[in-house]
Amino acid sequence: MGQSTLNPGGDATPSLEHVVIVGASLAGLSAARTLRTEGFTGRLSIIGEEVHRPYDRPPLSKKFLSTTDGHSDLGSDDVADAEWILGVGASSLDTTARAVTLTDGRTVSYDGLVVATGVSARVLPGFDKVGVHTIRTVTDADAFRTALTADSPRVALVGAGFIGAEIASTCVALGIPVTVIEVSEVPFERSLGSAVGAELSRLYVRHGVDLRAGHSVSAVLGDEAVTGLRLDDESVVDANIVVLSAGAVPATAWLESSGLPLDNGVVCDSTLQVVPGIVAAGDVAKWPNARLGEFRRVEHWENAITSGEHAARTLLGASEPYDTVPWVWSDQFGFKLQFIGSSIDHDEIYLDSTLDDGGKLLALYRKGDRLIGACGIRRTKAVLSLRESVGQPGSWTSAIEQFASRSEV
């Protein structure tokens, strides 16, 4: 019933009779679908810590908060003959015995394993009070949505990344006062660069956000329930709802005794293989992307899908490198921000922005002679037209020739 396969190094591996996917996530679902479409007919088990089958997470910080709608199921019924083990997580992995131990004490043996456990919200010390929220799951989002319906909600967001900006946008649309505290001098300084961050700062303030950039929280006020935050400049932010949006950490605690390589994620080779018979996908996977010259994780929706597909094919014997160009979008304050590639360690940025006049933004990022990333607001066509050239030798010059003349801006 199973099928034999070759690992990416070409050595024969045991026949795949039973593939186990740990993580009922978008990446895990994508891997499961691909295993079946690529012809795997053996036993397929999908383990998920939540009671829900995979659902769409991006709306949790946006539309979900302003409606009474439930979460959007991702149609996992199209994975034929899958065994869903939900409401229980993985506690450890024995690679010698090829077995996953679950938090309820059961063990599940495997021939092939897909690690797709994603990330969990970064929790900061001192934030263990009633009224403090994180938004990673539908349960989290539902609790926060309920809190927003209380009398006189006053929201403070710690961290101005994508989730924080989207929540702030939702609060503004609902007429709820919101303060954003960001330790960097501008929002998105690391992911989009200081120049784009400065443009977004002005945009947020114009929409009514109380932005406290360049500051950190020194104390969480209140006894059992939060009443406010004291910042490092001794100012106090009045808030009865606090959202931690200060990043995420890979969900790898269950792998700490496994012997697998861990370094801010599960370390993979260029094909997403961890060791023969084990692959990783989604937010938890850290791999070398030769096209961008980077070795890191990518926490984006599209990457969850494509890495899940790629990891499944690798498990079945394919050996192609996963050299994707990441793409992410974010809906904020009535506009869609899109970003492709990377801005990390860029040497130069070309910026054309008319956001102060309610217009558009285009940012291009150079590293050496290559275009490594592009960011746009109301510039969908321009950004997506550059995707194939990202990371290619000499691509910076052609990108500048195309856009710096302003004929396309």
Image (spheres, rainbow, N blue to C red):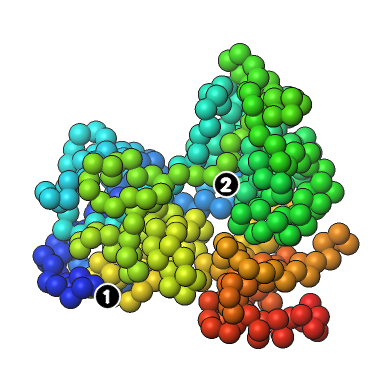
Instruction: List x then y, in percent, for residue 55.
Output: 46, 51
Q: In the picture, which quadrant includes the N terminus? A: bottom left
Q: Which of 46/196 is in front?
A: 196
Q: Is residue 182 above or below residue 366?
A: above
Q: As shown in the figure, which amino acid type bears the numbered disc 2? A: Leu
Instruction: List x then y, in percent, for residue 402.
Output: 71, 85
Q: As shown in the figure, which amino acid type bears the numbered disc 1? A: Ala
Q: Residue 60's mark?
A: 2
Quarter of the view holding residue 357: bottom right
- Viewer can see residue 291: yes
Would residue 248 be found to the left or right of residue 111 on screen? right
Q: Residue at x 53, y 76 (%)?
A: 391
Instruction: List x then y, in percent, for residue 99.
Output: 16, 47
Instruction: List x then y, in percent, for residue 274.
Output: 27, 60
Q: Residue 318's mark?
A: 1
- Viewer can see residue 70: no
